[in-house]
Image: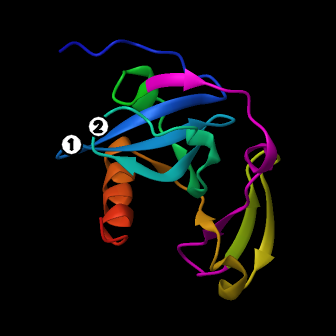
Amino acid sequence: MTQRRQKRREGDLILIPLGENLFGYGRVLREPLIAFYDCSTTNDAPPGKLTEFPTVFVIFVMNHSITRGRWRVIGHEPLSGELLKEPLFYKQDPITGQFSIYRDSTGEEVPATQQDCEKLELAAVWEPEEVEDRLRGHFSHQGM
């Protein structure tokens, strides 16, 4: 099957094949952010109103996950609520080990403690395979 090129648009709902007839779902945010829903199915049809499910994480993801058709766009809804808020991330200097809180829209970094960063995502860009592994791990811990 040839993968179809797609554009990446804020608000797009995406289908993420996780193997063994398991699918996850995400939502395209401001580039390069994607939110991932706490929802999986054993067929490629999203259950009911997908946007009513909570998100499990929001991270930076390589655009080619969508533009090359690996993750298929299955719908579109304007962003609202929590998805409009800018998430904060953390960074850790590889030499000094110092932590900082990072705001992507401005590039601002504020010194922080490790404890300040515990509930934040690392400021890193993920490949689609890494995200798929993370989602499989998340759903397997839910006792599916």
Real-space Cα separation, disc 2 to disc 1, in angstroms: 6 Å
Label 2, residues with CA under 10 Å away: few <14, some 14-19, many ≥20: few
Q: Is residue 93 magenta?
A: yes
Give the image location of residue 99, x and y in percent.
67, 77
From this view, report whether residue 10 is shown above or below residue 16: above
Percent coordinates x, y for residue 11 in the rendering:
65, 29
The local crowd at label 1, few if under 14, some if 14 to 19, many if 20 or more residues have their Cα within 10 Å, is: few
SS for tag 1? loop
Left or right for 9, reference 134: right
What label sits on residue 99 in the rendered view?
Answer: none
Image point (60%, 81%), residue name = 96
Disc 2, disc 1: CB below 8 Å? yes
Residue at image coords 40%, 13%: 5
The residue at the point 62 percent across, 41 percent down is 51
| Disc assigned to residue 21 | 1
Q: Name the quadrant of the N terminus.
A: top left
- Seen in the picture, residue 70 relative to 124 is either above or below; the reply is above
Q: Is residue 42 magenta?
A: no
The three-letter code of the residue at mark 1 reads Asn
What residue is at 37 percent from the left and 42 percent from the top?
A: 128
Q: Which residue is mark 2?
A: 43
In terms of depth relative to the viewer, which is nearer, 71 or 60?
71
Amino acid type at circle 2 is Asn
- Could you tell me residue 47's position as x and y percent? 46, 40
Residue at far front of view:
48
In the image, residue 52 sits, relative to residue 48, either above or below, namely below
Magenta residues (range)? 73-98
